[in-house]
Image (cartoon, helix red, strand yellow):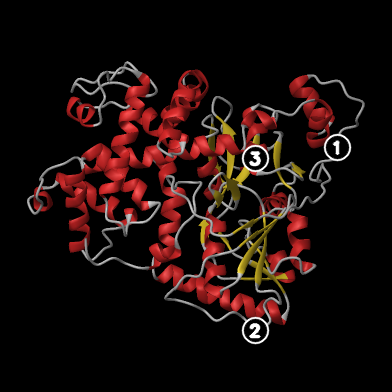
Amino acid sequence: MALVYQFASAIIPWYVEPPINSTSDKTLTVATHVSPHTYYETQSGPSGFEYTLLDLFAQNLGLELVINTTETVDELFAAINSGQAALASAGLSPTRQRRQEFLFSEPYLESEPIVVYKVGNYRPRNQAGLVGKKLVVVANSSHSTALRKAQKQRPDLQWREVEKVDSTQLLSLLEQGLVDYTILDSAEFVLHQGNFPSLKRAFAFGPAQTFNWMFTQSATSESMRIAANEFLERVQRDGTLAQLEERFFSHSDEVGQVAANEFSKNIHARLPRYKNNIQRVAASYAMDWRLLAAISYQESTWNPRAISPTGVRGMMMLTQPTAKEVGVKNRLDIDQSLSGGAKYYHQLKDRLPNRITEPDRSWFALAAYNIGMGHLEDARRLTQSQGQDPDSWYHVKETLPLLTQPKWYKQTRYGYARGHESVHYVQRIRHYYSVLVWQDLAPKDQFNLAGDTLVQLLGSDWVADNNNVPTAMAPQPLNKPLADVEVSRAKVTIDNPATNTLASAADLIDAESLAQQTNSL
């Protein structure tokens, strides 16, 4: 699927001249996969950590970004070998074999290959624990390469490789009990874990690996690679890369397994009762309903009759003064509570300086919803006094916990506050929102395969072991791809991708807001 994006012109302080003859039509074409950490489409436009980084690179070069999605690793390689793409970006690690065929940029992310298992089943502690088990990995991936290397020392280690299967599908097979283990990059698993709370990391299958952009071995590609290295060095030095990592990965660490399991259960047990109410109220405020759902879950776990010891109550846990301010007469009324909370959130958002852009604007409004605007402004002033950016959540979330320490809160106007709780509050909402977004984009039940499809994917012997599915197909060999694929392509043009919703896993980023520091409140 090929997607073309037009970008509005922007002044970027670290502009790099486009490589000579890098493209003939002023486009930067990239081959990638669809996944939470690479690239995916939402109602608000394209998103993903790698997409956003490529977005900045394309703007930096003054080029249009063209995204070609492929379904297999082999198709990814073919796309750049054939000239259909200038580079590939899909969590690719520069293995020894790949370095013989391709050029690689400097790294932009580090991740561990990890074995993933289902809680309640046997947890392997090392490679010996994988012997005799149903282990599946993506065909021709760096993980299959690592397995082949390990097999030289442990010949009894066996596995199966599958094509036309992404990480979501692999994890779904694991969750359903159709396979015992899979190997995934830790950076990707952390984004999936909210949707698969019953799955956990078992152990690291080897040392940490880097993710790098991949190019063909040609003079034109070498020119592009040099430009990419300059860009990556700059975004690492100026903090842009660290802010992107915080934006896409940090919030997933805030929710423990018990809480993640409860949220997953409540998505099915409670949310359907109130989803229409949430969507209706969110629409009246031009608000992403999933954001309102995430806030209301954090406040009351979708319990419209919730009451706290301090007197806040209802779906959005409004205080009496706040309820009066936003016109709520009955805090236990579902629609009134949701509407009052949404109205109050937007009021807080409107009070922030206009120069604070998304996604930080939404995160600051959430922090103020929890801790109050006065304490938030105190934290922003402290942030600025320390030489950091008061308009960046990346910096302010490090300052908010200081409001519990006399050394710092005595310098503020509003004094002591439990700033660490506010940080956790925002990060948890970001996590819940991300889970809801990805569940909308890739519902797990769509991967509940059966019958001949499962047989083709896993082999009749494995399927019979799990589901007793009758089939005439013979068992498939180990360590070989088990499915063929075809490439599908489509084309979409967007003039100015932007979003007004909370940015956690499904939003776009403004390059200027990341690159520039603000020196005044």
Q: Residue at x 78, y 29 (%)?
A: 462
Please give left or right for residue 315 compared with residue 222 in the image. left
Asked whether the viewer can see residue 445, the reply is yes
Tag 2–tag 3 contact (CB < 8 Å): no
- Percent coordinates x, y for residue 401 in the rendering: 22, 47
Q: Label 1 sits on what residue type?
A: Gln
**Numbered mark located on residue 20 in the image:** 2
Which residue reaches farthest left? 410
Q: Compared with residue 204, is residue 226 higher up or lower down, i.e. above or below?
A: below
Which residue position is annotated with label 1?
476
Label 2, label 1: how far apart the Cα atoms are: 49 Å
Residue 501, percent across and down? Answer: 44, 45
**In whole angstroms, how far apart are the C-alphas of marks 1 and 3?**
18 Å
Q: Quadrant of residue 295?
A: top left
Question: In this view of the protein, which residue sits in the foreground, 212 or 309?
Answer: 309
The residue singled out by tag 3 in the image is: 182
Q: Which residue is rendered at x = 66% and y = 26% of the image?
A: 177
2 vs 3, front mark: 2
User: Looking at the image, do the residues carrying marks 2 and 1 touch, with CB atoms under 8 Å apart?
Assistant: no
Mark 2 vs mark 1, foreground winner is: 2
Q: Is residue 320 left or right of residue 413?
A: right
Q: Is residue 428 above or below residue 382?
A: above
Disc 2 packing (10 Å; few <14; some 14–19; many ≥20): few
Q: Residue at x 27, y 53 (%)?
A: 396
Q: What type is the residue that disc 3 sits on? A: Thr
Where is residue 119, by image quadrant? top right
Mark 1 or mark 2, which is nearer the start of the sequence?
2
Q: CA distance from mark 2 to mark 3?
A: 43 Å
